[in-house]
Amino acid sequence: MMKPIVVMTQTQRYDDQRAEIVHLPFVTTEPLPFDQTVLYRHYDWLVFTSKNAVTHFQPYLKMLDFNGLAVIGAKTKAFCESQGLQVDFYPADYSQEGFLDAFPTRQGQHILIPSSQRARPLLHETLQARGFDVKKIDLYTSRFLIENVKRAKARIEQGQVDALTFASASAVKAFFDNVASLNFDTYYAIGQQTAHQIQYYGYSCSIADVQTLEAMVTKILEERVQ
């Protein structure tokens, strides 16, 4: 059996010998200005929800006094450790829901969450409701890469795509907001929230068993064998 042609749309490049990977990122990130006075205080926890958040916040790390570092996602954890940052809390479920299920509640603790302007509010709103003092920084925003969306559409129309993967809701929006109806239905999502966004546009998709790019490719291969 020939390797499947998989278009992957996340920002970071990913290689997998099991498939022919075509990397067409649908979204890029751009830093946003923010009130830096939030940096000049003590925090019990600094929370990173993505590798992008770590990248954009790195220039400010030395300015911050914090006790513990909490992260969501294996890639986020690995990137933090590659930068010499010790991760103190890391849930097995790579989602905001998984984080909230496992995070120890200690009312009154101070938490800083630098993340995307487009991030779901569930994390910081729930932590606030539990009695934490939470500061959320809109650290960066997303911009759609329409040329790559057009390239993916052209490949699909030419029959050169076996699977189209999404690792974020914003990538889903970039695609379906800019592509008219296609005779294609082999979509894959990294997790439940991304899948919900695909379903919002009226399409079905398969979901990776674990929220990693590797697991998405595994799911594609499993379904090709069936």
Image: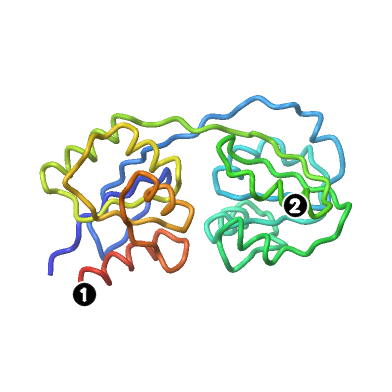
Residue that mark 1 sits on: 226
Q: In this view, does 134 lie above or below 78?
A: above
User: Depth check: 74 or 163 in front?
Assistant: 163
Colouring style? rainbow
> What number is the disc on residue 127?
2
Amino acid type, mark 2 = Leu
Q: Is residue 23 above or below residue 93?
A: above
User: Depth check: 212 or 67 in front?
Assistant: 212
Residue visible at 32% across and 38% down?
A: 176
Which quarter of the rendered picture does the C terminus lie within? bottom left
> Marks 2 and 1, Cα distance to the nearest angstrom?
42 Å
Q: Position of residue 66 (x, y in %)?
A: 81, 49
- 149 vs 126, left or right, is left
- 37 vs 15, left or right, is right
Amino acid type, mark 1 = Gln
> What number is the disc on residue 2?
none
Number of residue marks: 2
Q: In this view, does 150 lie above or below 195?
A: above
Picture quadrant of residue 62: top right
Q: Circle 1 sits in a helix, a strand or a loop, which is it?
A: loop
Residue visible at 36% across and 38% down?
A: 26
Q: Where is residue 149 in the image (x, y as percent from the top left)?
A: 29, 35
Which quarter of the rendered picture does the N terminus lie within? bottom left
Residue visible at 24% across and 40% down?
A: 152
Picture quadrant of residue 163: bottom left
Of marks 2 and 1, which one's residue comes earlier in the chain? 2
Q: Position of residue 119 (x, y in %)?
A: 58, 42
User: Depth check: 9 or 79 in front?
Assistant: 9
Q: Position of residue 91 (x, y in %)?
A: 63, 65
